Amino acid sequence: MSKLLFFHPDLNNDSFFLSEEESKHLTRVLRKKNGDTVHFMNGNGIEAIGIITGDHSKQVQIQISERIEHPLTKKYKFHLAIAPTKNNERIEWMLEKCTEIGIDEITFLNCSNSERSQLKLDRFSKILISALKQSKQFHLPKLNEQVSFETFVKQKQHQYSNKFIAWCESDLASNLNNKMAQLPINQTTELIFLIGPEGDFTAAEVALAKSHYFEPVSLGKNILRTETAGIYVCSVFANHFQ
């Protein structure tokens, strides 16, 4: 049976207590008891093998017996900057799938045509952790506060070696797959990708991005929903560098 992974942000101490929610899950749902082994990860590449030394349903105590380091092995770093959708469930679905596929950093953009300005980042963080555990990974994507499109683009002017902006004006933009063919797969590559709201970026936003060295690209002939575009781009990058 595949081992279950549990999340704990601080695995430096040799002994620690779990929250009441996690304690109930371990003792009442999974029927874990004293002496049983539990695997933890902290989202920063560390896996810890813990032994239950106190199986109280409201406060389980864990004693770490071994730590295992899981270094990043993939050859790319991907930062997705995307306008949040109006439907919160679609955002959560995208975050879950992007984490499963592989992503390093996520920033939500406030654009001219944005449909949502208030986000539940605490809820989103739980989605990321759940997807990380489910996919048996050990590096949690960084989730940033929402920022204006202009501020973000200007901040990233001199960062990342490959910067792209998705644009629905496909006849004026290069196809992403053609661009990927030009990227080497035998060296570490940093990529940042901008995806706009359902109404797309405005011409002024595209012009601003281009002036800060973002290259407009098309995702194909079909017009994708914002959250679908985010997952598609994740898949293209993961496939290219696999």
Image (cartoon, rainbow, N blue to C red):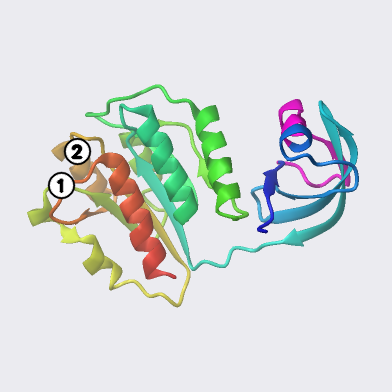
- How far is disc 2 from disc 1 in space, using C-alphas? 7 Å
Q: Quadrant of the N terminus?
A: bottom right
Report whether 126 appears left or right of 210.
right
Tell me the crowding category of disc 1: few under 14, some 14 to 19, or many 20 or more residues within 10 angstroms, Cα based.
Answer: many
- For residue 132, above or below residue 175: above
- For the question of whether residue 241 can be seen, the reply is yes
Frontmost residue, 77 versus 237: 237
- Give, as a three-letter code, the residue at label 2: Asp
| Residue drawn at the location 53% of the way across and 41% of the way down | 128
Whole-percent x, y for residue 28 in the image:
76, 32
Q: Secondary structure at mark 2?
A: loop
| Residue drawn at the location 83% of the way across and 29% of the way down | 59
- For the question of whether residue 103 can be seen, the reply is no
Frontmost residue, 159 versus 13: 13
Q: Secondary structure at mark 1?
A: loop
Frontmost residue, 210 versus 37: 37
| Residue drawn at the location 20% of the way across and 43% of the way down | 206
- Give, as a three-letter code, the residue at label 1: Cys
Q: Disc 2 designates what residue?
A: 200
- For residue 61, above or below residue 40: above
> Are the residues tagged 2 and 1 within 8 Å (C-beta)?
yes
Residue 20 painted magenta: yes
Magenta stretch in the rendered image: 9-25
Whole-percent x, y for residue 90 in the image:
35, 35
| Residue drawn at the location 33% of the way across and 28% of the way down | 87
Q: Disc 1 designates what residue?
A: 168
